[in-house]
Image: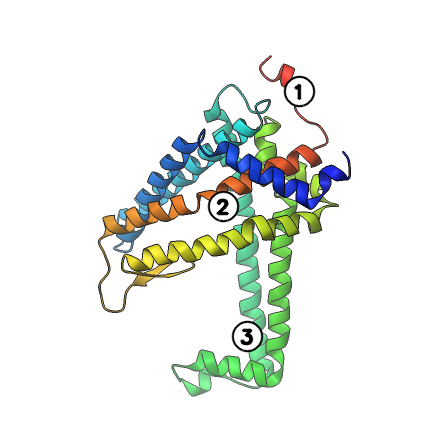
Amino acid sequence: MSSTSLRTGSIAKESLANAQAVILPTLPGLLLFAAAVAGQSWINRLATQGGQTVFYWMAMGTVTIFVGCFWSATMYRHLLPEAGTRSVMADAIRLFLANTAVYGLFFIIGFLLTLFFSLFSGVLIAASGYDPSETGSPDEVWRSVEALSDSGGAMVLYALLIIAVCALVWLGLRLFLFGVASIAERHLTIFRSWPWTAKHVARIALLWVSLQLVPWLILSLVASGVLHAGGFDTVFSFYVGPQPDGSAASDLTFALLSAISTLLFAPFYWVGHGLAVALYRRLAPNRVDAETTFG
């Protein structure tokens, strides 16, 4: 491993080249994923009515994640021909299990952080001398925020929130290679890739911000515009309800617009996988031997 190969510019250039290389070969996977997202969006709208639709929502959500993993596996296999197994389906299942484990980890951490901040904010509000139960006002939430601000407790809460967000980002950067490693190493790999990124968090963070965060923000605005033009209120491409004038389009129209938004996000996914492969080639200590891949 040379210092030149670890230069940010070199990694960024290879990431973009990798992204360009997977556009056409993995296009069927992208279209399949967009169709799955459309189905998930349609079920999401129906699930608001309750009943058995909630079960379909959970089932379709699982299918959508698996289809995304299938598309992801095809991109990794194309960029790393020596990696993977004989069957792309086996690789997709392994990647699905790895993603489920990591998503579950972040869900648990997010739940614990939410619980902590809920309790801690209550302690700070009580320490400020304000009792929301005494007023009975419908805007007691804002009055609580004002009480926190007046007492200085809000600064403590905001500082802890910033620290928590930074910690979650740091954790995500340390686990950035678990997906490509699960395909390249041909077995479930999550924390085994942890030491690979230990000394390179700052470099990965710079690449992540420039090649992932900034493009995501831009594409989110574009996707929001598409959904908004179709009659839906959105916040960074996340659906938050129909337009105030009640001009929301039909469920099928929303599903179609969701599929279009997914296609608009394709460059984000292409570059993300290209970046993961570029980093894996440089940081993984034991690359897979191509001669014994299918032996």
Q: CA distance from mark 2 to mark 3?
A: 39 Å
Left or right of residue 202: residue 81: left
* Mark 1 Cα-neighbour bin, 10 Å: few <14, some 14–19, many ≥20: few
Q: For the residue marked with disc 2, what is the amino acid?
A: Phe
Left or right of residue 246: residue 32: right
Q: Which quadrant holds the N terminus?
A: top right
Answer with mark 3 or mark 1, whichever residue precedes in sequence: 3
The residue positioned 61% from the left and 78% from the top of the image is: 153
Residue denoted by label 2: 268
* Mark 3 Cα-neighbour bin, 10 Å: few <14, some 14–19, many ≥20: some
* Mark 2 Cα-neighbour bin, 10 Å: few <14, some 14–19, many ≥20: many
Q: Which mark is residue 244?
A: none
Residue denoted by label 1: 289
Q: Position of residue 125 (x, y in %)?
A: 56, 79
Q: CA distance from mark 3 to mark 1?
A: 56 Å
Q: Secondary structure at mark 2?
A: helix
| 188 in relation to 295, above or below | below
Q: Position of residue 21 (x, y in %)?
A: 52, 32
To which quarter of the image does residue 234 belong?
Answer: bottom left
| 78 in relation to 231, above or below | above
Q: Secondary structure at mark 3?
A: helix
Q: For the residue marked with disc 1, what is the amino acid?
A: Asp
Q: Secondary structure at mark 1?
A: loop
Q: Which residue lies most toward the top here?
A: 295
Q: Which quadrant holds the C terminus?
A: top right
Q: For the residue marked with disc 3, what is the amino acid?
A: Gly
* Count of marks placed on residues: 3
The residue positioned 52% from the left and 57% from the top of the image is: 111
Q: Which mark is residue 122?
A: 3
Left or right of residue 67: residue 202: right
